[in-house]
Every structure is written in C-alpha cells, then in structure tokens.
Amino acid sequence: MLSQTVLTSYSIDLKNKLGQSQIMTGENTVTHDVFTFAASADSLSILKYNSALFLRDKFVTSRQYTENRSLMGYSFSEDGNPTLYWFSQEEKSIILIKYYLENKTLRALKFQIPLEDNYILANYQKDNNFYLLLQSKTKQALTAFVFKNGMAEERFLDFSSFKFIDRKTQPKTFNQILNENPIEKMDAGEYNPLYKVSAKSKLYTLPNRLILTLDQSFRKTQLFDINLDNQEIKEKIFVKPVGAKNPKTSNSFYHENKLYQINANADELLFDIKDYESGQSIKSFTVSKQDTIRFSNSPLLMQIEDRAPKQLKNTAKFLKVLSSLDAGISVYKNQKNLFITLGGSGSDLKSFSVNGFNFNDPFGDFPSNGLYNVETNYSAFFECIWTKKLELTKETHEPFAADQVYYFLDSHKEAALFSTLKLNNYTILSYYDVVAKQIVLRKFTDGFN
C-alpha cells in the first residue's frame, strides 16, 4: 500500500566507515536538477541528475580541505554548480567549496563563524542560497549570514527596541525569552510533527524573509516579520481567543498568511484562525468539555512514546490530558487538502527504585542510591482535513509521504545515512544500502498508492 518507487541507484563502497560518511540530496530550484552529495571518509561523490532523475554528470574528488569536517549544507550558483559548506566545531569555521562539474575543478574559501559571541540557532537552504542563523550571547539580536554565489552577506537583526514579557507577565530581554523558550525551526512545505510545533518560539523561513513567533504568553502571540534584504523588523501582536476560565496551555502556527491559535484548559478548547494582514478572525471554534468536536476528522487520540495511539472516550478526557501538555498546532498543505493537527506533547520523569533486587551490576549502570529516572514522552491530538478554502470535509486521513518514509526506514535496517528532499508533489528519500553498497533514491507520495 505504500507509494514508494526506486528512482535511481548508484554503486559506491563506503568501506564500513558509516560514522565518517554523510549523504545529502538537494534541488537546484532554477534548473530543477537534483544533486546527491555522498561524503565518505576519504572521498566525495557528486551525482547530478536532471529533473527526470537520469544521471547526467558526476564528480568524484578527495576530501582535501575538509578532513574532520561535517557537511552542513549546500547552495547553487547562477552557473548551476554547487557549493558545499563543511563545518568544524573545533575550528569554529566553515570551508566553502565550489565544485565545477564541467572541468572537474574546485575552489575553496574559509569562513570564520563568530562563535565567541554567538550560538548557532539554525542553518537551511532556500532559493539556492545557504543561510546560517546565530543568536548573540551579549546583544539582544540575531545575525543571519546569507551565502550566495560564493559570498557571505551579513544581516544584523536588532531586537533591543522591542518589549518582551514572560508567562507571568514579568519584563524580560529578548535573549532571556529565547533562553527559556529555545527557537525551533519549522520545515517549510513539510509536515511538522507535534513535538516540534509545541515549541513556544518558532521560526518560519520564507524567500528573503523570516517569521519569528513567540508564544510564551497565554494572552497573545508576539510575531516578528523580518526582511533579510533591508534588515527591517516589524512587530505584530495577535490576541489569543479568551474563554470563561484562565487557559492552561496555548500556542500558534503560521501558515500562508494566516495565524492559527489555540488556547485550552480542562473545560474548553478555543481555536482561532486569523488573517495575517488584518489580524481579523476568519474562523473561530469554541469547544466545551460536554461538546463533540465537529471539525475533527479523527478520533481523540493519546500516544505514549512510539506505541499505537489509544482513543480517548470523550472531549472531557481529551481536554483534561491536553491541559497538562504543551499545546501545539501543525498545518500542512498538499496538492489536495489542508491538514491540521491540534493537540499537545509533553514528558513525564519518573524515578524507579531498584532496592531489594539482586542486580549483578559490575559496570555501575545503576546509581548507588538504587534509583534511576525514566523519561516518558506522550501526546494527545486529533486531526482535521479541510479544503484549501478552510471548508470542512468528511475525509479520513491517509498517510503522508513523511509517514511512509519513517515506516520504510523502521522496517529496512539496511538503509543508513538517510536524508529527505521535498519536491513539488513528492518526497525523495536518499540513503546508503549497506548490503547492496548503493546510494538509493526512492520516491514517496502522500496517500495510498
């Protein structure tokens, strides 16, 4: 039933050094050529495919300049050739190497990352450029480096003029808010799972633009629209829906010029969809614990770790569980519909006593006091399937391409060094088959085949 197809394979022997190897696949968004970069302990293979995934060119070279470095990302120049970014934590630097496939030559540059004063927040590819985002240790600011055509352009993003408050409405600095609520980058155009979207600080990557949302407050979403061309930062405040009692958990999700907000306690769930430009509500839902959730297309579910989800009997039980979790909303659009997951995720740390048991423990695996801690992750959620015009449907959920990728990897232990690439209407899974000694590219699509 899984819609998976082998697109292409390429024989290569990584000589059982998987710990020193990496595979990454990327698309040149202008030419739609697809590249696979396979780094072994001592060599790099660049495979260039056309948009129909036929191998058109390859470049095999040594790991000169990049020994003991990890592959961080890629970009593509106007001439269509790739640049790879090789990172070293010890040297606090990136080696940029442009690879010229037409004459099998390369050119290397070194970029020193200012890590004495900054932390690395995120790195990503967008529109053939490579982005590196840093958080300052001393200034109330972020710094973005935009790498294009072999040049690094710095963007200093100053947040010192804005006011911030924490969950208890106490004034805090920008850095204090981010230290308490670390930024989680959302994967553009892909389904973001509940454990990611339950973060209180989220970063959305758009062309030449960033959206940063802060949801540490129950009362509002503080949103920053960041222009990476002129470094202008615009603040927007979106008030969260208010119920009869104080909320216990809340969050938001930005998707295609709309902000989806949730506020909940054990008695009610409030769900609001606002227009980004005007701030006006497009749709609002209020669900009490006595109600049936009319806009849901799935049962109310609770999941512990990776076990099969169990159905909760009614809305009251669901809200009771949700109110103890970090709420989250995930919005994903495919060719056909809009998929919304509402719920929350959290963890529970329990201590277990091993006193009185005759453990043969020669390696000291158990602490001397006879106690050890086990952290259990759990979530509660339901799913909605709407049209792109936000009309309700009665459709049932079919697996996403991402679901099928996870299922495939879970059942194929020979697949190692995997990475995924989202194209217009399907996802490519790249991996190394340790048995066949091949790099394999497989196609996965949403839904049943």
Image: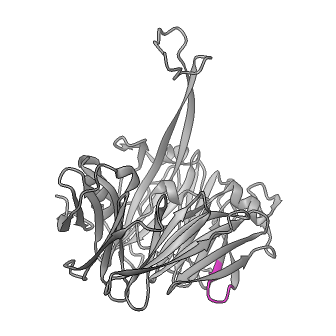
x, y (%) of residue 26?
Answer: 36, 74
Query: Quick check: 354 above or below 441?
Result: above
Query: Residue 162's image quarter?
Result: bottom right
Q: Which residues are magenta?
A: 225-231
Choose between 4 and 113: the one closer to the eye: 113
Question: From the viewer's perspective, is 436 left or right of 283?
Answer: left
Q: Quadrant of the C terminus?
A: bottom left
Q: Is residue 221 visible?
A: no
Query: Residue 119's image quarter?
Result: bottom right
Choose between 319 and 114: the one closer to the eye: 114
Q: Is residue 12 visible?
A: yes
Image point 66% across, 81% down: which residue?
155
Image point 49% across, 16% down: which residue?
362
x, y (%) of residue 303?
Answer: 42, 44
Q: Quadrant of the N terminus?
A: bottom left
- Any magenta on residue 281? no
x, y (%) of residue 366?
Answer: 54, 21
Image point 79% across, 68% down: which residue?
139
Query: Residue 199's image quarter?
Result: bottom right
